[in-house]
Amino acid sequence: MTEKQIVSRIAEGDEEAFEILFNEYHLKILNLSYAMLHDRDEAEDLTQEVFLEVYRSIEKFQYKSQLSTWIYRIAVNKTINQIKKNKLRRFFSMDNSDVLKASSFEHSDWTLKDKQYNDYLHQALEKLPTKQKQAFILFTYDQLPQKEIAEIMNCSLQSVEVLVFRARKSIQKYIETIDKEIFK
């Protein structure tokens, strides 16, 4: 079968054609993932995700490259995202002493993760309504009491409490959304 025939048949739901494709590339993708992740179980899971993605989006294949190139591109992107996800997970599971140890290295990967997290936080802040952003920054960064923030913003204490609460929720939701998008 030619690539076009395989793609066409898979797009039509032909399981036999998909099995042919899977058998052709399964070990290659597994080896690639394992070489990058250094974890057999993760590599196997990721390989399954790659082929699910291939199956779901085969009709989007436009023959601008070889089918193998397209499959490898999916595998590399998913593997890189998994690596980032693993590093972020390790970073956020560290206790404070680990963070201090990690930050003591000048060329540490943790410094990059801190920067990425701060970038996400700044992006989230930019999406907040103005009053939420003001209240959140005054409360979190400037560490002002909410009563003082209420005076600065010329609103009630309850309004400040609500603004800070909503800002936190919005930021948390934004970062979770970014995590899901980045680490699909």
Image: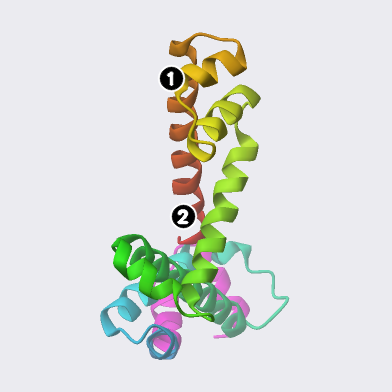
Establish if 35 lies above or below 74.
below
Establish if 138 lies above or below 39.
above
Residue 82 position in % (x across, y down): 42, 70
Residue 158 appears in which quarter of the rendering? top left
How are the colours assigned in the image? rainbow
In which quadrant of the rendered image does the N terminus lie? bottom right
Residue at 28% in and 85% down = 40
Magenta segment: 1-26
Q: Is residue 10 visible?
A: no
Q: Nearer the viewer, residue 96 or 19?
A: 96
Number of the front mark, 1 or 2: 1
Q: Secondary structure at mark 1?
A: helix
Q: Nearer the viewer, residue 67 or 38?
A: 38
Q: Secondary structure at mark 2?
A: helix
Which is more N-terminal, label 2 or label 1? 1
Residue 142 position in % (x across, y down): 54, 36
Residue at 62% in and 36% down = 127
Dot 1 alpha-carbon crowd within 10 angstroms: few under 14, some 14 to 19, many 20 or more: some
Outermost right residue: 64
Residue at 38% in and 65% down = 91
Dot 2 alpha-carbon crowd within 10 angstroms: few under 14, some 14 to 19, many 20 or more: some
To which residue does mark 1 refer? 161
In which quadrant of the rendered image does the C terminus lie? bottom left
Residue 177 position in % (x across, y down): 48, 47
To which residue does mark 2 refer? 179
**Amino acid carrying mark 2 in the image:** Asp
